[in-house]
Image (cartoon, helix red, strand yellow):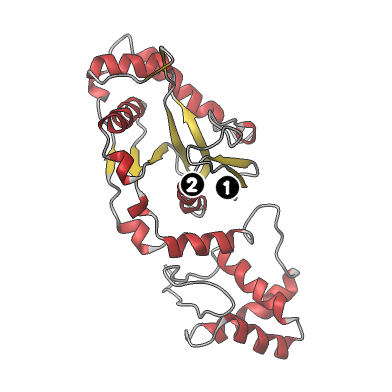
Amino acid sequence: MADFINSSTEQRQPITSYMDVGAEHANSTIEPLVNRLVEQLRADDDPETQERYTPFLRAVHSGSRGYAQRVPGSLTTRLHDFLSRHELHVFLIYDWQKRKYRNIREQFPLAVELTQAIGKREKIPHPFYDEKPSTLSVDFLLSKQDGGWEAVDFKEKKDYAKKKTRQKLDLAAITLAEAGVPHTVMTEDDIPMTIIRNYRFLRIHSLQFDPPPLASAAMDLVESPLRQQLISGRTTIFEAALRVSGSTGIEAFRVARACYWLLANRRWPVDLNYPVGPDYTLQFLPLL
């Protein structure tokens, strides 16, 4: 069964997207560096090693706005590092899509030798820090279930408007395109906050180390009557849990947790444009 993702995040076109740009200009100087990038993409993506991936920038390096956080993933079992609240929000969007993605690498670095060569070829100024060329990194490198990768950067609109910011993003995008990796830039306009709040609420029930709240037989016992109570869209989760508790003898709070687990593990297709919680109803979507 496919993941059920908010329709607005599926249909909205991000502010900038690059794919297959500059591949025709590859030359003998750049090609070995591109091959090395592809090898890095594959090596870090091996199931045996992906849990040991270390981001180029980590939460211990304080974020530009004083925000830093480490959060466990549901696609992986490792802690992910975020330097801004917006980065966390973007992560939640992709971490939810288990059927489409299998790994997320945050703060993925690009070799300086390669970005310098691309910058020289494309006549894009390369960033420097303390008189040394800076290492460019992308906020998220996504590994797709069907093979290949995608890259995503987040920038606030006020920062994206700056010429130097766009130049760095262009340089990263063209570099990744040489390896066949499409690059997308997102802004705060691409973050659906109701969806994010739902993801944050539900994901604690979908992490790999979080077991179902009920034994298998008990889950089977409550799933059908719980769905029947909720599918009309007029009964809150709390009310439905009380009714199912009365008919099964299972505590209402456990029934409610079973509901959240079913949602978090994509067993029920619901419209996540609407809030999810004990005092809310659910809006079911047609089965795909």
The C terminus sits in image quarter? bottom left
Would you say residue 4 is visible in this rendering? Answer: no
Neighbor class of circle 2 (other Cα within 10 Å; few <14, some 14-19, many 20+) is many
Q: Secondary structure at mark 2?
A: strand
* Residue at 74% from the left image edge and 70% from the top image edge: 214
Q: Earlier in the sequence, mark 1 or mark 2?
A: 1
Residue at label 2?
A: 101
* Furthest residue in direction top, as rendered: 29
- Location of residue 103 with respect to 111 vertically, above or below: below
Q: How many marks?
A: 2
Q: Which mark is residue 200?
A: none
- Describe the element under mark 1 as helix, strand or loop: loop
Farthest residue, direction front: 66
x%, y% of residue 75?
57, 47
Q: CA distance from mark 1 to mark 2?
A: 8 Å
43 w.r.t. 268: above or below: above
Identify the residue at image location x=56%, y=86%: 229
Q: Residue at x 36, y 51 (%)?
A: 188
Residue 207 placement: quadrant: bottom right
Is 33 left or right of 121, judged from the image as shown? Answer: right
Count neighbours of disc 1 (C-alpha within 10 A) and say few if under 14, some if 14 to 19, many if 20 or more. Answer: some
Check the image and report above or below for 232 versus 81: below
Instruction: Give coordinates of residue 211: x percent, y percent.
Output: 72, 60
Q: Are marks 1 and 2 in contact (CB under 8 Å)?
A: yes
| Direction from residue 270 to residue 26 in the image, left or right | left
Q: Which residue is mark 1?
A: 75
The picture places residue 176, in percent across and down from the top left corner, at: 36, 28
Q: Amino acid at mark 2?
A: Tyr
The residue under label 1 is which amino acid type?
Leu
* Residue 39 shown left or right of residue 80 in the figure: left
